[in-house]
Amino acid sequence: MKYLGIDYGTKRIGLACSDTGGTVAFPHGTVKAGPQALSEINSIIQKEGVEKIIIGESRNFKGEPNAVMEDITEFKKDLEELSGLPAEYEAEFLSSAGAARQYEGDFGRKSAPSQDKLDASAAAVILQSYLDRHSKKE
């Protein structure tokens, strides 16, 4: 099964795809957040043969939904409706920080090679977390 991982942001939405066996996540790219994002992501879903969507669940340090989670919930619902595919949440706690560590040098968000690469890598971190958890259950 092929998966699409999503790191939702208010400026950019990071995307990652798994291999066809659903074991390894790879950064795919980003789309600009806004009115066209859903149709662009749906096109990628069709082109890549995605069968399931994994979206980062954004929570604060107390484990409570943060301010962007309301937008993510609406986005998830709309994407499920448009694509006809199921979507699940995966905790995204510090996924951007984890993605930044993949790059050499200072590990902060500001020093990453580009924000697009960082957002796509964060989506891959989210997706890989999901894939790892579910491979252990099988």
Image: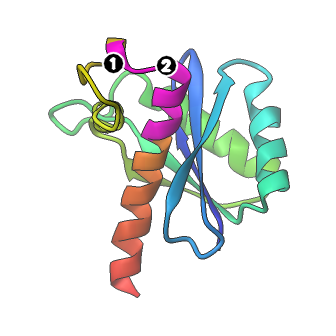
Q: Which residue is drawn at 51% across and 57% down?
A: 25
Corner quadrant of residue 39: top right
Q: Residue at x 43, y 31 (%)?
A: 69
Q: How crowded is mark 2: few (under 14 residues within 10 Å), some or many (20 or more)?
A: some
Q: Estimate the x, y position of residue 99 in percent, counting from the top left.
A: 36, 36
C-alpha distance separating marks 1 and 2: 8 Å
Q: Quadrant of the N terminus?
A: bottom right
Q: For this rendering, which residue is in front, 38 or 74?
A: 38
Q: Estimate the x, y position of residue 81 in percent, counting from the top left.
A: 76, 49
Residue span colored magenta: 111-122
Q: Mark 1–mark 2 contact, CB under 8 Å?
A: yes
Residue projecting furthest to the bottom: 138
Question: For the residue marked with disc 1, what is the amino acid?
Answer: Arg
Question: For the residue marked with disc 2, what is the amino acid?
Answer: Gln
Is 77 above or below relative to 65?
below
Callout 1: SS = helix
Q: Which mark is residue 109?
A: 1
Query: Left or right: where does residue 35 sit relative to residue 107?
Result: right
Callout 2: SS = helix
Is 81 above or below relative to 29?
below
Q: Mark 2 = which residue?
A: 115
Q: For this rendering, which residue is in front, 33 or 25?
A: 25
Asked if one can make out residue 7 in the rendered structure from this viewpoint, the answer is yes
Does 117 lie within the magenta span? yes
Is 130 above or below relative to 122?
below
Q: Estimate the x, y position of residue 11 in percent, counting from the top left.
A: 57, 15
Q: How crowded is mark 1: few (under 14 residues within 10 Å), some or many (20 or more)?
A: some
Q: Which residue is drawn at 30% across and 35% down?
A: 59
Magenta stretch mostly in which secondary structure?
helix
